[in-house]
Image (tube, rainbow, N blue to C red):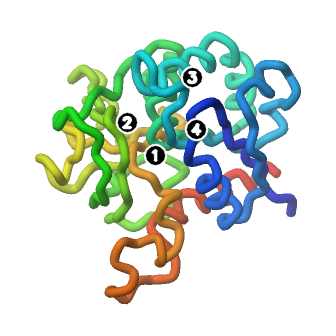
Amino acid sequence: MAKPKVLILRTAGTNCDYETDYAFQLAGAGTSLIHINQLINNQVYLTDYHIMAIPGGFSYGDDIAAGILLANELKFKLIDKITEFFDRGGLILGICNGFQVLVRSGLLPRINSQQNNQQATLAMNTSTKFECRWVNLQTDKNISVFTKGLKNKLYLPVAHAEGRFIASDTILDQLEANGQIVFRYVLPGYPHNPNGSHRNIAGVCDPTGRILGMMPHPERYLIRHNHPRWTRENLPEEGDGLAIFRNAVDYASTSC
């Protein structure tokens, strides 16, 4: 069986691309690190891939707002190509800055499949500062293909200044009802919820379950040695984040 192909999207300021690339390789995929200009200029075709990942970082220096410039490139220069890719069954994963990009481009949460219509945002942390810490997450009952068989509690790092998920009560209620809330911070209040997200939301998916965005970094906990207490605790060899990538690869394998 052929390996699913993953496109790791890069631009100025991307800085978690190699970790994301490694995560998908560990999960059994073939990977390519692709600059956005290669897609815009038709040097690379998104439809040649099964998964697109938008890694963390500070795309374009987070000028104006985190992820908004890259989001506008997706929305105004690549949306037709992304739509074709997605309609063919493609998966999209956005981590941290990638989540900000997906939300600000309208690709998430896509309530009622309204694409290009921004329905939520990721605002400045209530602490008004960059938060870099490990957090406990709860996997909600959800429709995402990325979380099949995932354990209920995860321990992953966050590193962001604009991670506070905000939406209207109407949108939040619909996300709850649709099973689109994928991850929550286990406890309310700072520092357990590091950014003040509404309803402790740490990650959401679209109505199909094939687009996932999350603020925590699963690519930073792939093996036991990534854990901050790996020398003092009896940890499993596999980190909590790897299963998310493996689920994506396993799902995409059905269309290879």
Dot placed on the residue nearer the N-terminal end, 3 or 4: 4
- Residue 117 relative to residue 13: left or right: left
* Whole-percent x, y for residue 90 in the image: 69, 38
- Who's the residue at 28% across and 23% down the image? 167
Disc 1 marks which amino acid?
Answer: Ile
Disc 2 marks which amino acid?
Answer: Asn
Dot placed on the residue nearer the N-terminal end, 1 or 4: 4
Q: Which residue is mark 4?
A: 14
Dot placed on the residue nearer the N-terminal end, 4 or 2: 4
* Whole-percent x, y for residue 192 in the image: 18, 53
Q: Which residue is mark 3?
A: 70
Q: Which residue is mark 2?
A: 178
Q: Is residue 185 visible?
A: yes
Per the image, label 3 sits on a secondary structure element best described as helix
Dot placed on the residue nearer the N-terminal end, 3 or 1: 3
Disc 3 marks which amino acid?
Answer: Leu
Q: Nearer the viewer, mark 3 or mark 4?
A: 4
Mark 4 to mark 2: distance in Å? 32 Å
Q: Are marks 1 and 2 in contact (CB under 8 Å)?
A: yes
